[in-house]
Image (cartoon, rainbow, N blue to C red):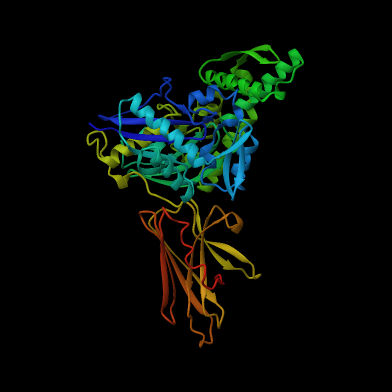
Amino acid sequence: MAASLGLYFGGTSACLALHKDGKTSVIANDAGDRVTPAMVAFTEKEQLVGLSAKQGRARNAVNTVTHVKQIIGRRYDDPVVSFVNQNHPFKIVDKSGEPMYQLEMADKHYLKSPLEVATLIFKKLKETAEDQGGYDEEDVVLVAPVDYSSEQLNLLRTSAEKAGFNVLRIIGEPSAALLAHGVGQEYPSEQWNVLVYKLGGSSLSVSILNVNNGIFRILATETDRTCGGDQLTSLLVESCAKDFKRQWKVDVNESKRALAKLYNTCENCKHVLSTLPTASGSIDSLHEGIDFSTSISRAKLDSLANSHYQKAVQPIRTVLEKAKMTSADIHKVVLVGGSTRIPKLQQYLKSCLPEAEVLNSVAPDEVLAIGAAIEAAILTGKDDEEIELKEDDLHLECCSKNILVKVIGTDGEAELKTAIPKLTYFPVKKQHDFKVNKGQTSVCLHVYEGDNGAIDTATLLAKLTLADLPTDTEEELNISTVFHFKREGTLHVSCSEATSGKIESLTIGHEDLEESDEDDDKPDEPAS
């Protein structure tokens, strides 16, 4: 029987799962690891992807790039890009507003786009599927954050397709997590409120979903990109650097290479401490020819990271407030991300949600890939015994960002008004009415996409002009605009004026949301 693939592409790691003969399993890479580092190292002679790039990071830190998931599809001035740029040894530069990785080799600078780097990682995963699993399947379902913009989703799809995958669908991370655990499938008539807690290497996201009759509805979500497993590792690095300086009177922070070596060792210790009470590490010639060895207890990690744990559970309270729920309303908790293995953090989670059942039977760093593989099997109809769901029973698509319209406020300044709120489910139809001044012959509707109402951070999707408006009326004209988000993810916008019967419309496809600038040469008068 043919196989179906599910792929999770994270900020620090990636995972590929296979569904075949009613079973889902993770495909190990050429090193035997079930999770592959999502990083690429560039040298003058070759490009290293995955574990080989991670192993050489100490020697080639400036040319070893990571966190592509956070960078792809964003503008250079995005705060997320700035945060990544400030906290990692590689350099991100501005090229016409787009962030680019700057490489330094042989006294020359080279630029690589996030799309190119993502494609290399996807190619590595494609090779893993072919070499280790012996499968040449191309059909794959990808997993993405629910707050990914249309451009980010398109670039994620493009990079996977350039690597040789045929992307069947991109599903949200919370939906994939629930699919992996079979939530709502064994007893479809029952209704659950499920909190998906994802703490990966580079970010934290918490979502609440309602599961009813096999349909997943996202009620609220919260993301913190300053809280992740990387920060826990950095706390260990800082502590070990102080111990080294106290013992040898030498500062490790003076050497980027020494810091990279120390970071790798502390990261390994952190992973060990998730299952064992103590972890040890040793580094030959850490700095200035001095060897370093350390033994770290779980109690020490918990002491260093106590404030970090408290910060990591704060979004739970925030997302409960957004959903207008209490902890007693949550029936189940799904853990996602390798950092959720930490026992002390699990205690904090349990104290926040004491009545909820914690689902962690699936490895938290593999759960999203497994859920995506199950989705791929459903879409391709390759498992009619184990999976009886129909495609439309899995989840409902929703807006990743607010759909906004530019209006003129009472102070005469342009501002954005929400036409369709973020996380609204498809299909949906909303109407927005406004007045135009007497004697005004045309009006131009500006449609934006954004997280909030700030014009400088929103993306212009389209302009729709309604021209030749009647001027012989004594009253202000009423303009009616209808926004119709269809099931397949396209946005249909119509603008009409009842007196004259004038009407204009356009459709914005999810694959070309930013190509609607054909009205630039028409009058550019925003709605009032």
Spot occupied by residue 362 in the image (x, y as percentages of width and height): 40, 27
Spot occupied by residue 297 in the image (x, y as percentages of width and height): 60, 16
Nearest the camera: 420 or 151?
151
- In the depicted structure, whether residue 345 falls above or below residue 392: above
The answer to whether residue 193 shows anywhere in this view is no
Q: Quadrant of residue 497?
A: bottom left
Spot occupied by residue 401 in the image (x, y as percentages of width and height): 50, 52
Q: Residue at x 49, y 31 (%)?
A: 38
- In the depicted structure, whether residue 225 falls above or below residue 437: above
Q: Residue at x 61, y 20 (%)?
A: 261
Spot occupied by residue 275 in the image (x, y as percentages of width and height): 50, 18
Which quarter of the figure is the N terminus placed in? Answer: top left
Q: Residue at x 61, y 40 (%)?
A: 92
| Count of marks overlaid on the render | 0
The answer to whether residue 100 shows anywhere in this view is yes
Q: Residue at x 48, y 57 (%)?
A: 514
Q: Quadrant of residue 167?
A: top left
Q: Indicate left or right for 267 with 285 as reference.
A: left
- In the depicted structure, whether residue 65 falls above or below residue 417: above
